[in-house]
Amino acid sequence: MQRFSNRTKLDFSKLKRDPYWDSQSELESPIHRIHGYPAKFPAFLTTQSLQFAKAQGIRVDLVADIFCGCGTTAFEARRNNKSFWGCDINPIATLIARTKSESFQERRLQNYFKHIMLAHQRNRSRIDYNKAPERLQYWFPKHQYTELARLQTSILEQTPPSSKYRDFFLCAFSNILKPTSRWLTKSIKPQLDPQKIPTSVTNAFEQQVALMFKATSKTRGLQKTNSQIVTDNFLTTTSTPIGIDLVVTSPPYVTSYEYADLHQLSTLWLGYCQDYRSLRMGSIGSLYHSYNFNRRWKNLNVIGNRIVSSLFATDRGKARSVAKYFLDMQCVTKRVYDSLSKHGMAVFIIGNTEYKNVRVTNAEHLAESLLKTGFRQVLASKRKISQKTLTPYRDDKGRFTTDSSGRHVYAEEFIIVAKKSAR
């Protein structure tokens, strides 16, 4: 890894790939495949980070992920017998993360599933499709909506409120919503497929639960560790513990996904909001922010200022949203610094992006932010992203492709390590 300081030019273009962060020595646990989630980073990076911290003389008891997403770091911390704290603004993400990091009794899972399916088979209650939320009518034909509503009722009736077992089956329910809807298959964008024949609700749920049963059975030998996962904004939450030894996280990319849009089916069905668009507000990297750009853009660091100035000549709206993202990330680095133990360390997995031929160097901006925050050492290297190496473009539906007429996707990302002390 290359070391950077306030006296070093932050140019990552000549960084070499580090094999240490490139490949894993063992197969990833099937628990990481229980629910679809975009832009997941490889699970082995958490273990590599723990080993790197140990080699640096850092004792790690508490691991944190400040953008915990679907719980990759949460589960891997448990697998390595470490306590965990995680935070994410997306309630679907934290539902998945809680489910992945919990332990379950097989007999109880089987018993709940049996009663859910019996209740679902018997449930012929009348569902008024005309009273369904307009957005759900858009995505689901009447028969599918009716069957899903009955299945959800059965889950709620047959599992204890606020329990990990209810979370388990709601997580399964959440992951069958796209295949049972008119959502275009494999599309990462909300796109309707009028020709699609949605999957049977009962079949999809049975197959999903079977997959989750099998995945959780592989984790039964693991010790139960202290784990806390909160649904909140890291910049405003009051539950962040002090004395975190290691942060392992992958921040959202500034020109990347609108997670609220991608998870709208789940957030509406599970009642997390009346209008899924409300979840856009407050999320780092979202296009939907209201703030005083003219007053605050002056707080950008050197790299952030340069990028925003370049974007301003091309797209003023995008320039404003990128500026907000960079300003938020500068605040993130300060909060991370304050939350770490005396000899703590943070590992960020982040990639650069591009918008209308302007390179948005998220990694360099983050490194500068970390140095200005007060971190004594900042190390960086890059790693390949194998899927994007083989399919380096996205088509107009957001799917990976080899067609060069699509939008180019970077085939590499950066590992940035920030050490609070010089030890």
Image (cartoon, rainbow, N blue to C red):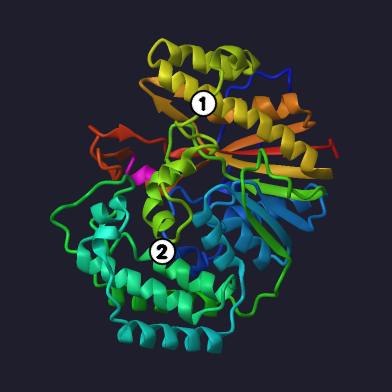
Res 144 visible: yes
State yes or no: residue 390 in magenta: yes
Q: Nearer the viewer, mark 2 or mark 1?
A: 1
What is the CA distance from the residue labelled 2 to the residue labelled 1? 30 Å
Q: Position of residue 144 (x, y in %)?
A: 24, 67
Image position of 134 (left or right of 92): left
Q: Residue at 60%, 37% (x, y): give it.
A: 381
Look at the numbered disc 2 and give the secondary structure of its residue: helix
Q: Earlier in the sequence, mark 2 or mark 1?
A: 2
Choose top left, top right, bottom left or bottom right for residue 101.
bottom right
Which label belongs to residue 290? Answer: 1
Label 1 is placed on what type of residue?
Answer: Ser
Percent x, y of residue 85: 70, 55
> Label 2 sits on what residue type?
Ser
- The label on residue 174 is 2
Q: Nearer the viewer, residue 28 or 227?
A: 227
Where, by quadrant of the figure, is residue 150 drawn? bottom left
22 lies left or right of 242:
left
Part of the protein shown in magenta: 388-392
Left-right relation of 18 to 151: right
In the image, residue 71 sits, relative to residue 6, either above or below, namely below
Residue at 42 percent across and 47 percent down: it is 276
